[in-house]
Image (cartoon, rainbow, N blue to C red):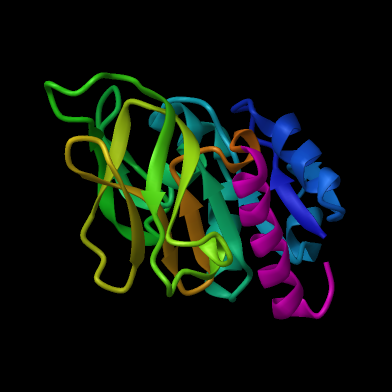
C-alpha cells in the first residue's frame, strides 16, 4: 500500500485517484501507524515551501526516518521541493534535508510562474522515469526551482532558458517538480514505476 501523506496542502485527491486508476492500493492519511505500515510514501502538495514544511509538522521527522530506513519516498511539486535542505519562498525555511540543495526563485527574465507543459530529457539511469523513452512532456506549475548541490543525486532536466531540474533520484528518494497526476499517460507511467519500486522493496503493494 502507498500512503499519500495528508498534510493540508491540496492536490491530494487527484494523486489518490491516479493511483487507484492504475490499480494500486493507496491510502490518504496523516496517521503515524499508516505511515509506518506503508510500502511507500508520497508527499504531494500545492503550496508555498514554508507553509508546507510547517503543515507537515511532526510527520516531517517520521517521513525522514522512513526514508533513512529505505522506504521509497516520492515528492511531487512542493512535496518535491521540501525534500531539499532549504527553501527561500517568503523567507528562508528549513526543509527535510534529504537532498543537498536549496529551492530558489526562477531567474529574472523568465516567465513566472512556469505553468504548462514542458519537455523533460530522460536519463537512462533513473528508474522512476523508466520506459518513457528519451523525452516526454509533463505538466508544471511553480515559481521556484531546485538548485541541487548533491553529487549523489541523479537529475532529469527541462529547458526553461536554462537547464532546470525536473526530477530527482537519490537511492530510495524520488521527486518530480512537475505533476505526474496531471500529465496524461506519461505521468501515469511514472506512478506505475513508483508502485513497482515499492513492490520490489517489500514484495507487495
Measured as percent of width and height from the top left, residue 179 is found at 55, 38
Residue at the left extreme?
Answer: 109
Measured as percent of width and height from the top left, residue 57 is found at 55, 40
Q: Quadrant of residue 123?
A: bottom left
Image vertical order of residue 43 relative to residue 182, above or below = below
Specify the principal SS of the magenta part: helix
Residue at the (61%, 55%) spot, across then down: 190
Whether residue 154 is in magenta: the answer is no
Image vertical order of residue 122 relative to residue 185, above or below = below
Measured as percent of width and height from the top left, residue 203 is found at 81, 80
In the picture, the quarter occupied by the N terminus is bottom right
State left or right for residue 62 relative to residue 83: right
Measured as percent of width and height from the top left, residue 112 is found at 28, 19
Residue at the (41%, 60%) spot, across then down: 122
State left or right for residue 200 relative to residue 74: right
Residue at the (73%, 56%) spot, across then down: 35
State left or right for residue 73 relative to residue 33: left
Q: Quadrant of residue 5?
A: top right
The region drawn magenta spans 184-205
Residue placed most toward the observer, 147 or 8: 147
Image vertical order of residue 187 relative to residue 189, above or below = above
In the picture, the quarter occupied by the C terminus is bottom right
State left or right for residue 22 relative to residue 136: right
Residue at the (84%, 55%) spot, across then down: 24
Q: Quadrant of residue 20?
A: top right
Count how many numbered circles sit on residues in the image.
0
Amino acid at each position: 500500500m502507498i500512503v499519500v501523506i495528508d498534510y493540508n496542502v491540496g492536490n491530494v485527491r487527484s494523486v489518490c485517484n491516479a493511483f487507484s486508476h492504475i490499480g494500486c492500493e493507496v491510502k490518504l492519511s496523516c496517521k503515524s501507524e499508516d505511515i509506518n505500515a506503508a510500502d511507500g510514501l508520497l508527499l504531494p502538495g500545492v503550496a508555498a515551501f514554508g507553509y508546507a514544511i510547517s503543515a507537515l509538522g511532526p510527520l516531517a521527522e517520521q517521513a525522514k526516518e522512513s526514508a533513512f530506513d529505505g522506504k521509497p519516498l516520492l515528492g511531487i511539486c512542493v512535496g518535491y521541493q521540501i525534500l531539499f535542505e532549504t527553501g527561500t519562498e517568503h523567507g528562508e525555511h528549513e526543509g527535510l534535508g534529504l537532498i543537498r540543495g536549496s529551492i530558489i526563485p526562477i531567474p529574472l527574465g523568465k516567465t513566472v510562474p512556469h505553468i504548462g507543459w514542458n519537455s523533460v530529457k530522460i536519463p537512462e539511469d533513473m528508474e522512476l522515469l523508466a520506459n518513457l523513452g528519451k523525452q516526454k512532456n509533463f505538466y508544471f506549475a511553480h515559481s521556484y526551482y531546485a538548485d541541487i548541490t548533491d553529487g549523489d543525486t541523479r537529475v532529469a532536466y527541462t529547458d526553461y532558458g536554462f537547464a532546470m531540474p525536473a526530477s530527482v533520484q537519490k537511492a530510495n528518494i524520488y521527486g518530480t517538480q512537475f505533476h505526474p497526476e496531471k500529465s496524461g499517460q506519461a505521468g501515469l507511467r511514472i506512478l506505475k514505476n513508483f508502485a513497482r519500486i515499492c513492490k520490489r522493496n517489500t514484495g507487495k503493494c
